[in-house]
Image (cartoon, rainbow, N blue to C red):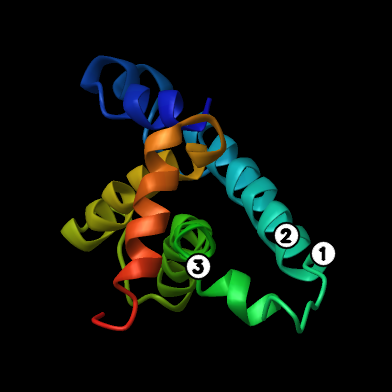
Amino acid sequence: ANVIVVMAESVPAIDKFVGNSRGNLFDCFEALSVLTFSVEYLLRLFSVSKDKQHLYSRLFYATTFFGIVDLVAIAPWYVQQVLEATGYLSTDSDVATVFRIVRVVRILSLERFVTAFTVLDNVFRASQEML
């Protein structure tokens, strides 16, 4: 649903109909989505059981491809909110547009449903030493 809303927001006619004022429908939906993603990320992070035999821990999950994708999917929203609240970023600036584009990373969060993303994770793990 989140990806569909982001795509709908990029259509000028729909964006004009909803309006660009702060706190519009798109902003509220995005805030709710990011908070949901944040809770999911924190639950995943803190529900990881420590397993010394397999070297699995919270840090291990956080540095996996999907752990990084989950973090990158939510972090830009928080950074944008802080920059806007402190006055370093205008909601109409090009930098704000870049933050909106980064939202597409949330598509990678659909990994649980697409096998191809699992292959990306395997490649990421195999080449981790080179990165």
Question: Label 1 near label 2: C-beta < 8 Å?
Answer: yes
Please give left or right for residue 109 compared with residue 13 in the image: right
| Residue 98 in the image, given as x and y percentages of width and height | 23, 56
Residue 92 position within the rendered picture, expressed as x and y whole percent measured from the top left: 25, 52
Q: Residue at x 22, y 22 (%)?
A: 12
Please state, as top left, top right, bottom left or bottom right, where the C terminus lies in the image: bottom left
Using a 10 Å C-alpha cutoff, classify the residue at mark 3 as few (fewer than 14 neighbours), some (14 to 19) or many (20 or more): some
Residue drawn at x 51%, y 64% is 71
Q: Is residue 103 visible?
A: no
3D distance between C-alphas at marks 2 and 1: 5 Å
Up-down: is 95 above or below 108?
Answer: below
Q: Is residue 58 above or below residue 8?
A: below
The residue closer to the viewer here, 92 or 26, is 26
- Circle on res. 47: 1
Which residue is identified by label 3?
64
Q: Residues within 10 Å of mark 1 (few under 14, many from 20)?
A: few
Q: Distance between the Cα atoms at labels 2 and 3? A: 12 Å
Viewer can see residue 85: yes
Q: Nearer the viewer, residue 22 or 122?
A: 122
What amino acid is labelled 2 in the image? Answer: Arg
Mark 2 Cα shell of 10 Å, populated few (<14), some (14-19), many (≥20):
some
Q: Earlier in the sequence, mark 2 or mark 3?
A: 2
Which element type, helix, strand or loop, lies under badge 2? helix
Q: In the shown orientation, is residue 50 left or right of residue 114?
A: right
Question: Which of the numbered marks, if any, corresponds to residue 44?
Answer: 2
Residue at the farthest left position: 94
Discs 2/3, front: 3
- Earlier in the chain: of badge 3 and badge 1, it is 1
Give the SS element for disc 3: loop
- Horizontally, is 112 left or right of 117 in the view? right
**Marks 3/1: CA–CA distance:** 15 Å
